[in-house]
Structure formats: C-alpha cells, structure tokens
Amino acid sequence: MNVQRKVHVQWKKGKPPAAGDKQNIDIPACLLSGSCMRRIFPRTAVLVYFLSMLMPLLANPATRIAYELPGSVAIASGGEATVRVKVKIPPGNHIYVGHEEESSTVLLDFQMDPKEGFQIAEVKRPRGQRKGPDRILEKEGEIQFKVFELQGRGVGSSVNANLSVRVQMCSNEGICYEPYIHKEKLLFLIHAKRQDVRDRTSSRIPWILSHAEAKEKARTRKQNLFTLITAPWCGACRYMEQKAFSSTQVQERLSEKFVALRILDTNPDRSDFRYNGYPTLIIRDPAGRELYNKAGAMDAAAFLSLLAPFEKEAGTDGAAPGVGSAQKNEQLILAIYQKNKEQVRDSLAQGANPSTLHGSWSALMLAVYFDQPEIVQLLIAKGADLRYTMPGGWTALSLAEAYQRKEILGVLQNQGLPRSLPAGRPPAPGKL
C-alpha cells in the first residue's frame, strides 16, 4: 500500500504568504526534491538530515560483531589472570584468526595500554577453518588471553581499564572491510596480595645492580645503557625472564652490544628513572639521554627487534642511535621489500643496522625470502647476524633451503653455517 503523508507548511513564494495561507506537501516526493526541502528546512538542517540517514550505511559492518566479556576479572597484585571472550560474528561474514601463508589480512587481536597498569600477552584464537592463505572464523568462537597487572596495586582496589579489539571482517562473498578497532571496558578486582617467587633471570646476562657503576661503564665503553626495572612479585617480569632473557641470542646481544643494568623495586636507584609499572624497559645513551622508555614485557623476537636500532660495539665512536637510526633501519627494510639493491647499499652506507629486525624477520632473512642474492652479499659484507634464529627454529640458511634459493644457498654455505631444516611449512613475512 502506498501511503503518502501530507502536512501543512508555510513558505515564501515571491512574497510572504497571507495569514492562514497553507499548501499541502507530499512528503515522499518532497524528499526527492531539493527545492522542496529547502522550503521546509534551513540548508544546514537538510544537510544534517541526509547525513543522519547515510551514517548507518557508511559505518563499518564490523561494528555489528558482538563481544561477550566477563563482568569482572579477579587478579592478584602484580599477578596474572586468564580472560575469555566470546565473539559473535554477523551471519554471512567471517573474521581472521590465523595465517597459513603470506597474507595482508588483519588478525583478531586484543590490546591494553601498559600506561593503565595492565598488559595482554599470549592471545589464543580459535583454529577456525582454512580459506586461501588464512584461517577464518564464522558465526562465533572463544578467544583466550593472559593479562598481567603491572603496578602492584593494593588488595581491594578495582580498575575499569580500556580494552581495544582490532578486527577485520569480510563477507563470505568476498567483500572485505577496513580493519576496525572496537573499544570495551574490563573491570579488574585486586583480590590477593603480591607473592614473591624465585628469581628466574638468567645468570648469563652480566647484570649490574648499581646505577652509578653502570653509567660509568656505559661511558667508558661508549655503549648504550639498557635498564630493567623489575620486581620478584611481578608476573610480567617473570614472563619476560622466561620468554626473552632465557634466549641465547638475547643474552649475547645484551652482553656484547649494551651495558645491562637491573634495578629491583627495593633498590633506591629506581628514583633515578621514570617508570610506570613492572617491568619497565629503558635505554639511555652513554651521555644519559633517554632513547626509549616503556612498561610491559616482550618475548625474544619483539625484544631483539627493540634492541636492534640501539646496538653498539664496545669502544665505537659516533652518536648514539635514536630516531634517526630507527628510520635508517626502516628504510633498509623497505628497500629489501622493494628489491632495490642500490637503496639497500645507500641505507647500509648511512648506518642502517644489517641485523635489524622486522617483526621476527631479520633483514638477511627477508633478502633470502625475496630471492635477492646481491642484497644478501651486501648484508653479509656489513656484518649481518648469520645465526639469528626466529621462533620455530628458522635461520637464513634453512629458509634458503626450504624456498630453494640455490644461489643464496651457496653464498650462505660458504660462510660455514651448520645446516638444519625445521619441520613444517616455512614461514612468510607479512606485507609492509
């Protein structure tokens, strides 16, 4: 049934209407007529009206994904808790929960800002089902992640912290939408006091416990000072000790390229530093200028990537690395992705680190993956770390073997590296 509503309005038509002069307007027809709408509403009102009609159509469909969060999360002071979130996806759509091969799709992820005193680690997504290079989830699934309390709050306190969910949704017909960040609140209840546990920091790292001693050593060795603000009751600190400091590569990097300082929560030297939780990672140059400062734990791959721009051999001159050095490393990675040999050469000549990491991928590994033997030789000539091993046991040599990069394989074998081929499918780097 075609129902047309009609209203009485007054408008100017040449001259002001006489009192009581009215005219019937067909509303559906008027909506299609700009001149009619201008008679009824001011111009700005028309604009607002049409924008209000369009906004629901323009909104990212990922806003329709539903997240079922726990009403509250009980966590010990300085401890950890497991959080489970149920995700419900609109019918006819899917989200991404894993990559089987190289892919530019964005995986479902949960994050919290360590500045609020909480950190998320080890997000466990459902396996989902294979779709091309990805693993997707349809309908619904449960995500599990670990949360650390970083500030050692008092028992009985509560915090309503911000939770960010990053997701990309696609229709089953192949229409993919822009990645979307959904905001939620997560209520934490501090229910138990701090509990000290046995210190698990590796003795292979030559930690210095005095700030004055470490500053002097950094100055004389002309190396940057890495400082770890930590505590024996801190769950995130123990996580980093297990996931990062136990790594042979991390131990070698801190021993050879930095002066390593460890400050406990009971050490009065902690007042010399700006920190917002445990652990806090700080890097300063030999003159004491702060280059990096952030709370939260990392695994070995992320920590090595953090350290790479700030590494210095003992006794080397030159300005301490900072933002400029990080930019040079980014330019080097970009040049490798673009397979631009000359740009790689320029970046290395300008001081880019040949062992810099992009995620868990070293520059050398990227050159192997993109089958660029000349770039591989440039990186080796500049001292690239040939033995760097990413999670899963893959090295530049094993990648060259798995991807059958025959020319590169010969170059790497000439370096006397041991051969080892991990089980499973070789990894692929993500897109820039």
Image (cartoon, rainbow, N blue to C red):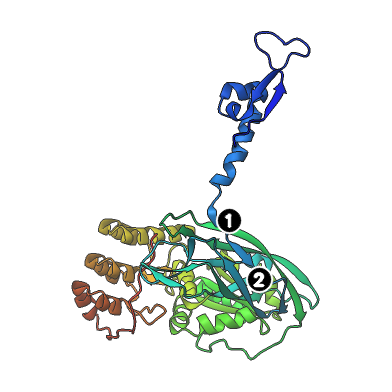
Q: Where is residue 397 in the image (x, y as percent from the top left)?
A: 28, 78
Classify mark 2: residues with Cα within 10 Å, few (<14), some (14-19) or many (20+): many
Q: Position of residue 212 (x, y in %)?
A: 62, 76
Q: Quadrant of the N terminus?
A: top right
Residue placed farthest to the right in the image? 156
Q: Which of 6 and 173 is in front in this view?
A: 6
In the rendering, at what x and y percent does residue 306 appear?
49, 69
Residue at the spot of label 2 = 118
Which class describes the residues within 10 Å of circle 1: few (<14), some (14-19), or many (20+)? some
On residue 207, the disc is none
Q: How far apart are marks 2 and 1 (CA)?
A: 25 Å
Picture residue at 71% right of the left edge, 18% below the top: 10
Q: In which quarter of the image is residue 382?
A: bottom left
Residue of label 1: 63
Quarter of the figure that contains the C terminus: bottom left
Name the residue nearer the viewer: 33 or 59. 33
Left or right relative to 240: residue 415? left
In terms of image quadrants, where is residue 359?
Answer: bottom left
Which SS class for mark 2? strand
Disc 1, SS: helix
Compared with 110, 46 (above or below) is: above
